[in-house]
Image: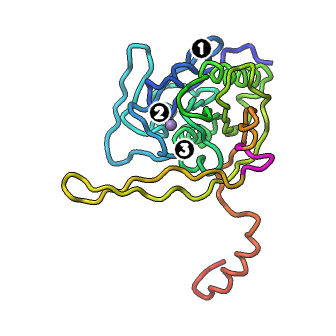
Amino acid sequence: MSDRRLKILLSNDDGYRAEGLVALHAQLSTFADVEVVAPEHNNSAKSNALTLNAPLYVHRADNGFRFVNGTPADCVHIALTGLLGYRPDLVVSGINNGANMGDDTLYSGTVGAAMEGYLFGIPAMAFSQVDKGWQHLEAAAMRATDIIRDMHVQGLIAQAPWLLNINIPNRPAHEMGASRLCRLGRRHAAEPVITQISPRGETMYWIGNAGPAMDAGEGTDFHATAQGQVSITPLRVDLTDHERLGYWAQTVARLAPKSVS
Ligand code: MN
């Protein structure tokens, strides 16, 4: 049980004006000290990218939110390495305009902002609303806030760091189900690239939409949110294929004498 007011760093990838950020900030501020450091513009699919080849500027909007001409990870990185001047208890990202399930988590700037906090040893949560358009945004913001408040009251924040990816179905509160622990599903490969001819005769390539769900079976985030439940998936950063280390040990040994195993 913790009575101390929680210190939250809030960011996102849709930009500091995004409705999902504004709604979540309003709800969280009822019980926590919340500082916003968010991108100036939409930074979807920027993952954990950092800006190393250009200077970053921080400005403060009339509502107190700070915004940065950089990526979501830039925002959290700057905040934690000098801008805030203190260590927040929790890094929160979102609420994103659209799902971040399965393979999305590798590309997501929403997850990237949270992951940057996690890499600095701070508990972190990424929130996304499954459909685009903010239709039931108030319900999603209240649900996200309930989850954070429940964890705070039970003393589950400010322990060892963890990273949670949370997707909230686009439904009114009374139609929303329980929280459900999930693994990530998988998507099919993305739609084909779209080509157009520019006014100057050059071919332009537009990255196609994400693919539909391929593994949306019981236990996945896709499955839970389709049932109206809130999916909660703990993520880790270590991409090592631990299960196949034995196989690769034999394979790498065959590459000798050039390789060292
Ligand atoms: Mn986004």
- 189 and 146: which one is in front? 189
Residue type at numbered disc 2: Asp
What secondary structure is found at the residue carrying circle 3?
A: loop
Which residue range is magenta in the image?
Answer: 216-222
> Residue 199: which disc?
none
Question: In the displayed structure, would residue 227 be above or below residue 103?
Answer: above
What secondary structure is found at the residue carrying circle 1?
A: loop
Q: Determine if the C-beta at disc 1 is less than 8 A from ligand 1.
A: no
Residue shown at 59%/16% (left/top)? 33
- Give the residue at mark 2: 14
Mark 1 / mark 3, whichever is N-terminal: 1
Q: How far apart are marks 1 and 3 (CA)?
A: 25 Å
Q: Distance between the residues labelled 1 and 2?
A: 20 Å
Q: Determine if the C-beta at disc 2 is less than 8 A from ligand 1.
A: yes
Name the main secondary structure of what is drawn in magenta. Answer: loop
| Residue 64 occupies quadrant | top left
